[in-house]
Amino acid sequence: MIRVGLGYDVHQLVENRPLILGGVLIPHDKGLLGHSDADVLLHAVKDALLGAIAEGDIGRHFPDTDDRFKGADSVKLLTHVWSMVKERGYKLGNLDCVIMAQKPKLAPYIDEMRGVLARELNAELGQINVKATTTEKLGFVGREEGIAAQAVVLLLAAN
Ligand SMILES: Nc1ccn([C@@H]2O[C@H](COP(=O)(O)O)[C@@H](O)[C@H]2O)c(=O)n1
Ligand SMILES: C[C@@]1(CO)OP(=O)(O)OP(=O)(O)OC[C@H]1O
């Protein structure tokens, strides 16, 4: 049995917040706003994983009205989602992601993000791809008002 899942998320860029993407702290003059740490890439990955196992989305499992998730570390939430995937008997086939950000330049941090994802998803680096694109200064991303991320995941039967 194979399963595919798709995830998409957007967070607003504001001053006085850290910018955390894929579990990596990135130096920038603005960060993402959210109830959690607002790691938009990991949110998209978790939604893709939950989608692949027909378990809804992160808002259902970690409501933004619940104080337990205030400032939550998105890596820890990913650990929980991945345990749900494993319990259902799946392993990672591959994961592909794109981050839409006008700034900052993300290329220097991409391999560290892949490393976090590979570690958390019990995978090899060769199963994980992360890309970044600007939107050529168009739209909310282009105006640096926010960052968006998309992820698509393929799960395979573990045995
Ligand atoms: N925040 C970003 C956006 C893009 N990159 C890298 O630059 C390449 C060109 O981006 P375009 O949006 O002009 O196509 C892109 O392929 C990425 O490699 C980046 O590092 N950080
Ligand atoms: C991650 C959660 C956790 O409360 O909060 P936010 O950081 O607000 O992120 P969002 O993608 O808007 O909603 C999902 C929530 O589950």
Image: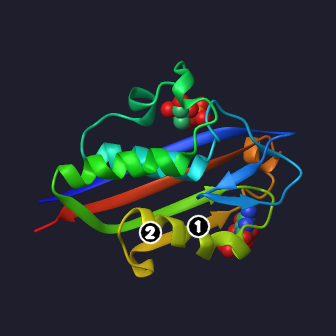
Horizontal arrangement in the rendering, residue 12 relative to residue 126 (left or right):
right
Q: Which residue is mark 2?
A: 119
Quadrant in which ligand 1 is drawn: bottom right
For label 2, the SS is helix
- Residue 102 position within the rendered picture, expressed as x and y whole percent measured from the top left: 78, 56
Q: Residues within 10 Å of mark 1 (few under 14, many from 20)?
A: many
Q: Which residue sits at x=64%, y=65%?
A: 132
Q: Residue 25: where, in percent of width, then height?
A: 72, 58
Give the mark toward the camera: 1 or 2.
2
- Residue 113: give its label: 1
Q: Quadrant of the N terminus?
A: bottom left
Position of 134 relative to 55 (above/below)? below
Q: Residue furthest front?
A: 68
Q: How is the image coloured?
A: rainbow
Amino acid at dot 2: Arg
Q: Quadrant of the C terminus?
A: bottom left
Q: Residues within 10 Å of mark 2 (few under 14, many from 20)?
A: few
Q: CA distance from mark 1 to mark 2?
A: 10 Å
The verdict on label 1 being within 8 Å of ligand 1 is no
> Could you tell me if residue 7 is visible in this image?
no
**Vertical comparison of 7 with 124: above or below:** above
Q: Which element is circle 1 on?
A: helix
Residue at image coords 28%, 37%: 55
What residue type is disc 1 on? Met
Q: Name which quarter of the figure residue 10 lies in.
A: top right
Q: Are marks 1 and 2 in contact (CB under 8 Å)?
A: no
Q: Look at the image and tell me whether residue 103 can be seen.
A: yes
Query: Where is residue 75 shown, x and y percent of the image?
Result: 52, 52
